[in-house]
Amino acid sequence: MFYFLDSLLPIDTEEFAGFPKIYDGASAVIPEGFNAVKVKLNGHLESNLDWKNELQFAEQMISQNYRLFWELDLGLFNLRWPLQDQTQFLALSLSVSHFRDTVWIKFAPNTCGISLYRGSIDFSKGSENPIKARDEAFDYIKLLAHNLPSDAPISILFETKSVQDPLLLAMLLHPEESRGLARAMTEDPLPWSAFQTSLQGYLSEQPYSDLHEELPTIGICLPSQHLYDQKGHHLFREAIKKLDKPYRFLSEAFLTSEWQGLDFLLVVPEWISEQGRRKLRGFCAAGGTVVTLGASLGLPQETSFSQWMQP
């Protein structure tokens, strides 16, 4: 099951309303509780791009008042050649362009989302820096996405089980790096509420009823990527191990729009920019307390992590 952290296109019809609840199963009879259906298209290098049967199925779903979520399977990132291979990139671009010219142009009004990738969030395959590998993968996806209209609701579906380090997972899901791509994740090792205040949709074989999880009151502030280092990562990782309450990651870049509902905000002072310090003062003025892992920032409502953890 995938939980969307960013919004796709809302569904507002006489029969269904709200965010996309997308059926991901194989049955031709859609279970009650869904308002959209996934249609998978083979866009691999070897594909002849003949999607006649899939498009007939899409027409049937529209006749039953369902919206469509297209999974354009390009085979990323298990490709035959390195990402730098231009012939391979042009072939995949052809798949995306063919989708635009034959599917999007016809089904756009009935579409709630398009996925260009479904797979592990760890692109490094254990051989390189996972954040660097993520950047290369995102750049590749965004280049392919340039073949679609700018208003197309493009998403990426991340299987997160392979990354058990919560902070590394948060950095890989960093919202600054995924702009223009709606992120969806599985709930292992962390729930969706560790990254977002409200669910934006889901893709599942069964309807999801628990849409309103208890939201954390503890926030963990992620840095901009250029300030991230292993020293700060170690401090946060050790602090997270000691937390016995739910927490939510948020980025410094979007701090003022994402601190709602938080009473405490954990920060590594070396990861905070000057603009970030101003935002933290605003958080304190709004009644929040900043919890520092390291040197004091001199904020009006601030405490150290060790003092904060005392009973």
Image (cartoon, grey):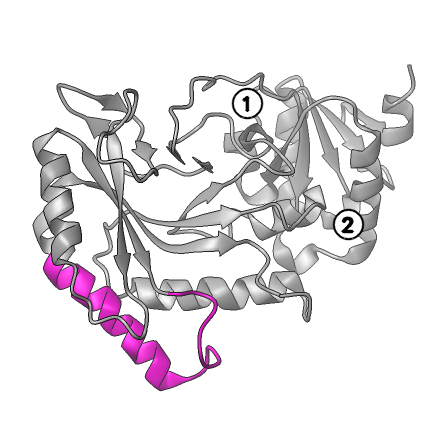
Question: Tag on residue 79?
Answer: none
Q: Is residue 245 left or right of residue 198?
A: right
Q: Specify which label sits upstream in the sequence, 2 or 1.
A: 2
Q: Residue visible at 31% across and 62% down? A: 145
Q: Amino acid at mark 1?
A: Gln
Residue 191 seen: yes
Q: Residue visible at 38% across and 24% down? A: 207
Q: Are marks 2 and 1 in contact (CB under 8 Å)?
A: no
Q: Amino acid at mark 2?
A: His
The quadrant holding residue 7 is top left
Q: Position of residue 209 (x, y in %)?
A: 43, 17
Q: Which residue is mark 2?
A: 233
Q: Residue visible at 35% across and 77% down? A: 89
Q: Which residues are magenta?
A: 75-102
Q: Is residue 54 left or right of residue 79?
A: left
- The residues bearing labels 2 and 1 have C-alpha atoms spaced at a distance of 24 Å
Q: Position of residue 136 (x, y in %)?
A: 52, 68
**Badge 2: few (under 14), some or many (20 or more) residues near its Cα, within 10 Å?**
some
Magenta highlight on residue 99 = yes
Q: Which residue is mark 1?
A: 260
Position above or below: 89 against 98: below
